[in-house]
């Protein structure tokens, strides 16, 4: 396997396939390629999770506030929580997925990115179209980074299982896009801790913490990582990930912590 990033999906009429050759790529090129795949894995990871995303879309579009901080401070928490519950219907343990989607769509509405996007990076690589059949896969290799995640689509597969695979792919892509962005992640994480110090998790508190964003002097990707890190301090993950599914679908396993676990 040469140095490349290939994303492929063939499921229920969703057919996507492309490949970036990374043999002579810069890290900015790789961040662009990774973010291109991220757009699909994130959207489709949410789509097949099982909650009613259209209900959340309608709610977010109807918020009259002029900014994301005002939306979080002015919209009653009870209304947001009722929305998340209603959007899940009988799948009542999917509220973490609905919440992740709510935040992702809210910040998208106000053009305040919380994830890396391909437009944030120089992209000088040509993309090759591929033609997947009956599978979902991410195959990536660049220097020391290797990622191989695959799923065969068989007649018995269920939507949530597809979402689980896409979420696993998405977790990898979010991390690597920021890793390859060439920004000072540690400094931004430290800033996020200062902005959230002493604040308990609540929607108005999140609005207060992000009231100064985007910060002048920061690039778009730096502001995206600062917002991403602030949300992380509040235990909010605004992207499709396996943990948001695991309470409803126990067979979706969340990633284990790296390193050796201490003995009991």
Image (spheres, rainbow, N blue to C red):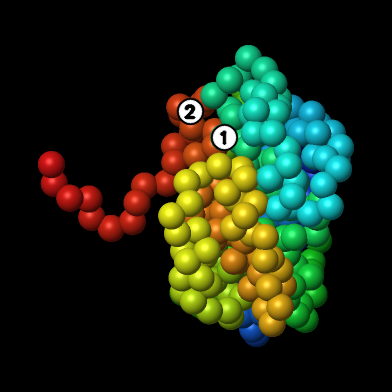
User: Is residue 25 something one can see in this rendering?
Assistant: no
- Tell which of 223 and 261 is nearer to you: 223
Q: Residue at x 70, y 40 (%)?
A: 102
Classify 10 Å Cα crowding around label 2: few (below 14), some (14-19), many (20 and above).
some
Q: Residue at x 81, y 34 (%)?
A: 59
Q: Position of residue 209 (x, y in %)?
A: 59, 58
- Tell which of 165 and 77 is nearer to you: 77
Look at mark 1 in the image and give the residue it sits on.
96
Q: Position of residue 65 (x, y in %)?
A: 82, 47
Q: Residue furthest left?
A: 264
- Nearer to us of marks 1 and 2 is 1
| Marks 1 and 2 close (CB-CB < 8 Å) | yes
**Residue 141 sits above or below residue 242 on the image:** below
Q: Position of residue 31 (x, y in %)?
A: 65, 72
**Residue 160 sits above or below residue 15 on the image:** above
Q: Residue at x 84, y 52 (%)?
A: 66
Look at mark 2 in the image and give the residue it sits on.
247
Query: Can you say which quadrant of the picture contains the N terminus?
Result: bottom right
Q: Is residue 159 left or right of residue 197?
A: right
N-term-proximal mark, 1 vs 2: 1
Q: Residue at x 47, y 46 (%)?
A: 200
Q: Give SS at disc 1.
A: helix
The answer for how far apart the CA atoms under marks 1 and 2 are is 9 Å
Classify 10 Å Cα crowding around label 1: few (below 14), some (14-19), many (20 and above).
many
């Amino acid at each position: 396997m040469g140095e490349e990033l290939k994303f492929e999906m063939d499921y229920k009429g969703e057919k996507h396939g492309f490949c970036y050759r990374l043999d002579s790529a810069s890290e900015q090129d790789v961040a662009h390629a990774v973010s291109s795949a991220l757009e699909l894995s994130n959207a489709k990871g949410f789509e097949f999770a099982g909650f009613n995303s259209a209900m959340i879309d309608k709610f977010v579009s109807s918020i009259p506030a002029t900014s994301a901080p005002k939306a979080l401070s002015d919209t009653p928490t009870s209304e947001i929580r009722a929305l998340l519950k209603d959007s899940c219907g009988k799948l009542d343990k999917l509220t973490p997925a609905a919440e992740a989607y709510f935040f992702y769509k809210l910040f998208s509405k106000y053009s305040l990115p919380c994830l890396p996007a391909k437009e944030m990076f120089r992209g000088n690589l040509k993309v090759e179209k591929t033609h997947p059949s009956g599978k979902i896969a991410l195959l990536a290799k660049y220097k020391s980074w290797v990622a191989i995640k695959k799923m065969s689509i068989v007649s018995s597969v269920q939507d949530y299982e597809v979402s689980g695979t896409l979420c696993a792919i998405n977790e990898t892509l979010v991390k690597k896009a920021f890793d390859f962005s060439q920004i000072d992640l540690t400094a931004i994480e430290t800033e996020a801790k200062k902005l959230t110090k002493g604040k308990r998790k609540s929607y108005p508190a999140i609005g207060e913490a992000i009231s100064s964003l985007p910060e002048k002097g920061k690039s778009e990707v730096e502001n995206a990582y600062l917002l991403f890190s602030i949300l992380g301090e509040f235990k909010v993950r605004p992207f499709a990930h396996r943990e948001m599914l695991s309470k409803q679908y126990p067979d979706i396993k969340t990633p284990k912590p790296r390193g050796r676990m201490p003995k009991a």
